[in-house]
Image: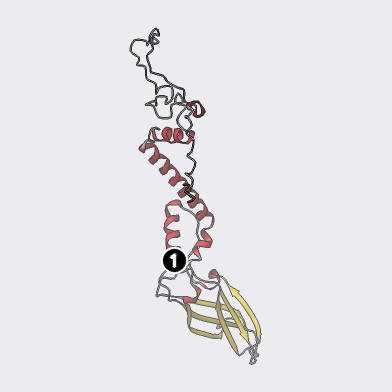
Amino acid sequence: MTDDTNTPEDPPRPRRRALNPGAFGVQRYDDTHRPGQSRPAVPLGQTSSPFEDVFPPVSDEPGSTADPGIPHALREDLERSGARPRSTARTLAWGNACLALILLLGGQVAYQERYQLLAIEPLEPWVRAACTPLDCQLPERRDLAALRISQRQVASHPDQPDALMVTALIENQAGFAQPHPIVELTFMDVMGRPLAARRFQPLDYLSGPGFPIPPGQSAELRLELKDPGGEAVAYEFRFL
């Protein structure tokens, strides 16, 4: 009697192939001792191992080129790690030299731009203090807005006809001594139009030495000038 029942066929089994070590660059090593064959002689002090041909020994020295098995990138890391550390004294010497050079260049720039730096109020005391030991020339400190005119008086000159005598006080309200300013005096008509104007240097209106005006003090101003005529009904002082 025949069984017509369909039975699934067994799946084909994969074939096994022998691994060829030569395909991976590995030499076959046969350690089987056969009668009639002699082992190769090994020099005294040297061991014979089948792994020496496959895995070359790693040198103890970092970055040794005698070890071809180490990648190039890893060899560079080993060389950097084995480099001698830089001397601390040498590093400090270079740092101090660079700092001195920066200070020298900064001082040269500040000296050349000292007049511009004086215009910056917070920097003015520092600039003057730095220039004192260097004996560099600086303009005197000025603040014309802190100068006031007071006790002004215009009268006919007692000794010269057609001349005027002008007297006033220049008050220094700044917190530091100031040099005497240039004084400009302008006469105007009833419409406020200028009729005559003149500028006076400190030597023109000072009766004595032109020492700076101390803070909170005043200096006397005395001017002698030609009478501008009857149309002049007003005058104005201005400091320059």
The local secondary structure at tag 1 comes to helix
Residue identified by numbered label 1: 122
Q: Amino acid at mark 1?
A: Pro
Q: Quick one: label 1, few (<14), some, or many (20+) residues within 10 Å?
A: few
Residue 67 image position (x, y, % from top left):
44, 26
Q: Write down the quadrant of residue 217 in the picture.
A: bottom left
Q: Is residue 3 visible?
A: yes
Q: Nearer the viewer, residue 171 or 127?
A: 127
Q: Nearer the viewer, residue 126 or 56?
A: 56
In the displayed image of the protein, which residue is found farthest to the top? 36
Q: Nearer the viewer, residue 167 or 2?
A: 2
Seen at 52% across and 71% down, the residue is 181
Q: Nearer the viewer, residue 203 or 174?
A: 174
Residue 227 image position (x, y, % from top left):
62, 84
In the displayed image of the protein, which residue is found farthest to the front? 1
Position of the C terminus by quadrant: bottom right
Residue 193 image position (x, y, % from top left):
66, 87
